[in-house]
Each structure stands twice: as structure tokens, then as C-alpha cells.
Amino acid sequence: MKRRDCLKAGLTLPLLPLVQKAAAATGPRPAAGLTRVRPGAAGWPGTSDWDQLSRAVGGRLSVPVSPFLGDAATRSEALAQLRNPFFIGDQPALTQTSGYHGAWLSRPSARVVSAANSADVAAAVNFARRHRLRLVVKGGGHSYHGTSCAPDSLLVWTRAMNQVELHDAFVAQGAAAGTAAQPAVSVGAGAMWIDAYNAVTTHGGRYVQGGGCTSVGVTGLVTGGGFGSFSKAFGTAAASLIEAEVVTADGRVRVVNADQEPDLFWALKGGCAGSFGVVTRMTLRTHALPDTFGGVSLKVRADSDESWHALVVETLRFCRDTLCNPHWGEQLRFGDERTLGVSMVFQGLSQDAAAAAWGPFVAWLAARPQYTLLDPLQALALPARHMWDADFFRRHAPHLIAEDTRPDAPRMRMLWKGDQSQVGWYLHGYASAWMPSGLLDDAQREAAATAICAAAAHMPVELHCNKGLFGAPADALAASRATATHPAVLDAFALALIGNAGGPAYAGSGGTVDEADAREGAARVQRAYQQLRTLLPAAPTYVSECDYFQRDWQQSFWGPNYPRLLAAKRRYDPEGLFVIHHGVGSEDWSADGFERRR
């Protein structure tokens, strides 16, 4: 399963005693047994209650219905747009992932508030709290764990809040005297990364650290501590957060930053906003734009297990010596039939310089007849300002992009062709682990290669080099260290990803889940992951791309940061209004978020 085709940890000690200590220090919690209400149950809001909410939000309250279950014309249009992430994102009843085997299916909420502003969000939050409703929040809707999806819930949908505003000299509200102004961009909660890149890079000539997939929501990626193709140069997306506007469980609209409510601000930088409130706007630091962006690709096959192992060892050595620096990002894919696929991107290099960097690796292959070059080295560079310029790609490389094909779609809506396979996918299994830089050392490289080869025998292993910050510059490391993301990311040279998925499984779409295939896919993922666990038995991982059933998730996602996150959760959401799967404080709730367990 390819995360994207092109252009696109250390160990920790058990921390449960620290988590328990932090929980005890934050005061009493509501008693176990608190339940939320479902449609038809006693306490579910009546018609007059819903009418009152509708008036409060300007009539933007409705019952979400999947277009695949609509009339013939509606369903026909939906089927034609089944692989269009922008269409899927425009449907309040749908999510970009259609489910995860043994875990969840994409199903609509009972009601949706299509929020236009923070006042709408506050009205929905207050309503849910008063009536004891399950509340979910959706912006981009890309969560692999279904955190923006819950049947019988009230959905706060922020899609319409997609404004983007550039600042030449931004100073956070209430900042300490002498705080320097800096270039920045303010982005509404419903904006996608293509909205941000179009404004900041294509038209503004600067760069904002965001996601590789252009239809991903800005808010979810930033608050999840997310990565983009060039994070090796600019740090995590959360590291660029200067300020956020957020509606907390008490219905207050707060503006938080390093000087105003710093604990909540810090929690939003990688702790997942869905556990703390509803972010309505965020302001991110922008960076000087490099001269160029570009990509490098090749594919090679080894003729035996012995030569395959040697190839993996050499690839890891080359990664250490050439790729662990701010210029490079994206992935190395160790696939079936002993094949290595390279889909790397670069910044700040010329096309010739990028190709030359790979010269020694290509020469190493050429000197050994046991390797067959299936796809020769290709390097391509372009002026950085055109990286997300849809018109540029329409003219020069239309084969690299897909588009929002609806007649009224904005012209700037493009996505990388390789990302289209993710639209609507039904995940069979998924697993990931941050790979600490020590594995690249001479003393450990052989063992690392052995584990990767053993894992790849079950399922392809992708090393996403941009999702580990080993080799990043000091300023990017410092900014990323000041987030809630697990500190293992700072020393990781890559995030290892293993996954398997089937096609869309939305009700009414015609897609069905092949249970036997899904079970086998999930089992293969786990067999592959277990091979990595022999090397890294307690490897931390990235909260947004990991196993739904992640063991010891508090440690795996946040490590030593979890006690501080839990304290912020107890302070700003003591009743647990905001519950997401494996989110901060979710251990207090049933899996569906409807009953307090402790």
C-alpha cells in the first residue's frame, strides 16, 4: 500500500506510573457510569430543542445523508466522484477513509452543524454539553482511526471555515513585550493544504510546513504533530504554530499562544485538538521559499535473498551519508520480489545536483550484476513557486496530478496522482514505528536490514524519511522539541510504515468488504510489524499513521509528554466532552465514547 508514489525512535521506558501520578494530581473526576444519550432515548433533544439550536447557528443544522444513499441522480453523481477527495470532503456524511477492519465504518452523525464561524461552534458545543450528546468534529475528515466519525452524535463540521490570510509581520495576541513580528499565515479550521499552499507559495512566494497530501485538513495535521515532504528542513507542522483560536468544552472562544494559556497551546501542538476543543483558526509561521523543489525516482530488483539483504544494508548506509539532511524527504519502499523503490523529494538543489547525489548509489548497483534496474534514475526539479500550481502542472506534467473534476471546482484544486488510491480506502491493517538513527550505525545496520527484509517478506515496508527529524537543522529541531509530539521523532531517521487496504466501502457505493481478504491483509501487516518489533520492541509511533489497536498508546504516541497532556485535558475538559479514539483522556471512556468507565 503506497502512502504516495512521488512528491509526497528511539525506545522509551514504561511511563504508566507517571501517567497515574499526573491523573491523581489533577483533582477528582466525574464518577464512572456517566452516559451520553442516543436518538430515541430519554433525554435526547426534542424538536423544539433542535429548532433552537438551528436558529442559533443561522439555520446551518441538518441531518447528514450519504449521497450514495440519495436519489438516482445524486447517487450517480457521487459514484462518478468516488475517487475525488474534494467531493468526499464536501459531504458531511462521509469521511476520506471508509473504515478500518474490526474497528469502525464511516457512518453519518445524527445531526450536523455546518459551522460558519466560532459562534456557531460555541453554540454546538454548549448544546452538546447541556444535552449530554456525543460530539465529534470534522475538518478534512482524513483520520485513519475514524475520529471525525461517530453514529448517533452531533457533528461540528468546519469545512466552510476555510479562509486563508497572509501576514507580513504577525505578533501573537498578548505576546510578551519585545516579541518580534514574523511572517505568518492564518488559516480557518476547514481549510485544506492546497488552500494554504495556493495562497502562501503559488501567490505569496513563501513556504508553510504542511502535509504532502493536498486534500488533508490543515487543523488536523498540525494538531496531530503532522509531517510534510520537507519536514527534514522545516520541522513538524506543529512546530510552526504561533497561535490558535479554540472553543473549549465550556463554550468559551479562547485565543491561545505561548503567552496566553500556554499549556493548552502546547497541547494543541501534537496532542490532537479533538481531545481538547474545536480549533477554529490557527496561525502558522511561514518560511523563505527555496529556489527549487523536485523529485528523484528509481526501482531496482535483487536476484537472491543474499543480494537483497546487501541492497538493504547499502541503502541504509546511503541514507545515513546522503539523505539525512534538510534537502531530502519522502520514501524508500522495500517491496515484494526483492524490489527497492525510491520516491524521494528534495528542496534547495538543482536537478543536476540532486542526480549527482545519487550517482554513487547508482554506480554501486551498476558494478554488481545481481541487481536489475527496473526503472532508471530520474530527477526532476521545478521552480519552488510552482510546486502546488495546478495550472503549471496542467501545462507541463498533467500525468502527475489529479483534479477536482466538478464543473464549479476552483482551478487550484489538485492532488498528486499517487494519493488518489487513498480516497475512500478501507484499511485492513496499519502499523508504524519511528526508526532511531542508531540503526544506521555500522554496528546496527546489518540487524536493521535483517529485520526489514524479514518484514518485507510479509508486506512492503516504507521508510518515510521526512517523518523523522534526524539530520534536521538546529532551529527545526528546537521548534519541534517544543511540541507535544513524542521526542523520539527528533532522533528518528524515518517512520517505518506497513499497511494494507481495500477499495471504498461506503454504504450504497457498491463497494463491499471481502472479510477473508481483510483478515488476511491485517494478519500480514501484523506479521511484518512483528519483525520490526524484534528490532524495536517498544518503538514509539506517529499518532495519525499507526495501528488502530496500538498497544500502550499513551507511551507510543506521547511518551514523557503524556502526563502534561493529561493535566491539560483535566483542566480544560473535566467532564470529557471531547473524546476521540486513543486520544488524551479517552481511557476513561468506552470505545464508542458513550459511557464513562472510570
Image: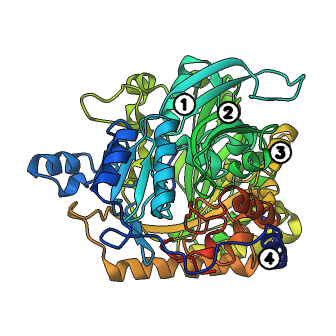
Q: Residue extending furthest front? A: 48
First reached walking from the N terminus: tag 1 or tag 2: 1
Residue under the image location 78 percent in, 48 percent down: 324
Q: Mark 4 packing: few (<14 Cα in 10 Å), some, or many (20+)?
A: few
Residue under the image location 74 percent in, 64 percent down: 566
SS for callout 4: helix
- Give coordinates of residue 114: x percent, y percent: 38, 42
For the residue marked with disc 1, what is the amino acid? Ala
The residue labelled by disc 3 is: 477
Q: Mark 1 near mark 3, Cβ–Cβ under 8 Å?
A: no
Q: Mark 1 packing: few (<14 Cα in 10 Å), some, or many (20+)?
A: many
Q: Which of 469 and 251 is in front in this view?
A: 251
The residue labelled by disc 1 is: 196
First reached walking from the N terminus: tag 4 or tag 2: 4
**Res 284 label:** 2
Q: Mark 2 packing: few (<14 Cα in 10 Å), some, or many (20+)?
A: many
Q: Mark 4 near mark 2, Cβ–Cβ under 8 Å?
A: no
- Give coordinates of residue 140: x percent, y percent: 46, 46
For the residue marked with disc 4, what is the amino acid? Gln
First reached walking from the N terminus: tag 3 or tag 4: 4
| CA gap, disc 3 and disc 4 | 29 Å
Work out whether residue 314 can be spotted: no
Work out whether residue 365 can be spotted: yes
First reached walking from the N terminus: tag 4 or tag 1: 4
Q: Mark 1 near mark 2, Cβ–Cβ under 8 Å?
A: yes
The residue labelled by disc 4 is: 20
- Give coordinates of residue 484: x percent, y percent: 76, 54
